Image (cartoon, helix red, strand yellow):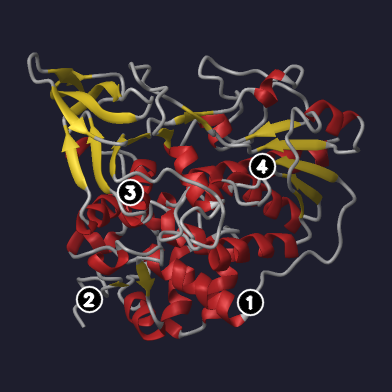
Amino acid sequence: MDVLKKVPVREQDPKVRATNFDEVCLGYNKEEAMAEASRCLKCKNARCMGGCPVSINIPGFIKEVENGDFEAAAKIIAESSALPAVCGRVCPQETQCEGVCVRSVKGEPISIGKLERFVADWSRENGFVPAAPEKTNGHKVAVIGSGPSGLTCAGDLAKLGYEVTIFEALHQPGGVLSYGIPEFRLPKDTVVKTEIENVKKLGVKIETDVVIGKSVTIDELLEEEGFEAVFIGSGAGLPMFMGIPGEEANGVFSANEYLTRSNLMKAFRDDYDTPIAAGKKVAVVGGGNVAMDAARTALRLGADVHIVYRRSEAELPARVEEVHHAKEEGIQFDLLTNPTEILVDEKGWVRGMRCIRMELGEPDASGRRRPVPIPGSEFEMELDTVIMSLGTSPNPLISNTTKGLEINRRKCIVAEEATGKTSKDGVYAGGDAVTGAATVILAMEAGRAGARGIHEYLTAK
């Protein structure tokens, strides 16, 4: 075994997986996981832990994997993470824990994410569940949203003995884990449902079909329902559009809608009634992970798919792995290209998109070079579907119906990073509702911070 190289991870063949919704990455088996774990240098001052937003004891759990004690590894991970099977699959480890792995100074970093996934999958298959607290402390806390931030906050508070109720607007819990990330990256019936059930086994209650701001307000939860604190982890589900002519046409989707129909409402399955105008010639506008998810979903629904992105490949915000998988599957990338108009036929349906070529100029406020149109480079693409994946912002319903809750110019809730404390006494917030759209692991970090803040607040009362 070459200790400088990762143990390869088995995947579905690109030509096969492009026609199904089964998981792309097949993960490690026992022998592969133990072999990969043996590459770890067991650093005393482990930089990988500093690169993990939720501070998992990475050398500790990897040592147990190497020894073959997978239950001990699972217990170590459970101290810091309520969603290891999710994080092992969708976290950007290459820019976090693996990005600072000492092994990468000479050779390839340890496959920390794949090892976390292995341990989580072993736990599910062998019935290991983190221990619930022996008794509650009598304090009631409400959590708004059952995505990664809300689930993490609820799990951490439950471990401390709090009586936690999560209120979820949709008919199934999971937030972006259920409606946003496709089945081929994150299986719902096995991975997501099991992680949610494990949080419930800690004593957390989940009420679905409750729209905070309509069904009940945060003020009513605090003043009438007996909750002593509230954590807002409602995410950022309001899609953004370009504002170009033709965006109102039939066949124009937000990536949120397209993915929700496919994922949560099972539109990709023949035995479900949910309709989706999947399209045969599809353009996805954007370059993030959500754009890759939408494009790869459209491909599996039978479309010829283009990614249209106004910067170069070096600026693509999506994970390298997701871009690599998309290219392997046959998705075409139209880079340094920007839409200027969606072309509509006489019946109001998309028939194409007018675009212009771009070149990179000086850096903008984000530090990336600003794309500048090239005069005279306009061209048209023949299409029947356009999916806009330009980011999201928080729905203003909660902020509009909660007294004394400060928001910023981006309509995000203002909250302290270390504790999640907002301008309203007893109300804490974190995740995309505070930062705008970000990653699952950063939402989890914010959920942990919110749990700490609420615990400090209630123990000081």
149 left or right of 402? left
Residue 452 in view = no
| Circle 1 residues within 10 Å: few <14, some 14–19, many ≥20 | some
Secondary structure at badge 1 equals: loop
Q: Extreme left residue here?
A: 376
Identify the residue position indicated by label 1 in the image: 128
Q: Extreme front residue here?
A: 346
Instruction: Give the distance between the C-alpha atoms of the residues marked 2 and 4, in whole angstroms.
Output: 43 Å
In the drawing, what numbered circle is on residue 95?
A: 3
Amino acid residing under circle 3: Thr
Identify the residue position indicated by label 2 in the image: 3
Is the residue under label 1 in contact with that under label 3 (CB below 8 Å)?
A: no
Is the residue under label 2 in contact with that under label 3 (CB below 8 Å)?
A: no
Amino acid residing under circle 1: Phe
Instruction: Give the distance between the C-alpha atoms of the residues marked 3 and 2, in whole angstroms.
Output: 21 Å
Q: Earlier in the sequence, mark 3 or mark 2?
A: 2
Instruction: Give the distance between the C-alpha atoms of the residues marked 3 and 4, in whole angstroms.
Output: 27 Å
In the drawing, what numbered circle is on residue 248?
A: none
Please give the name of the residue rendered at 69% of the width and 18% of the height, measured from the top-left corner: 400
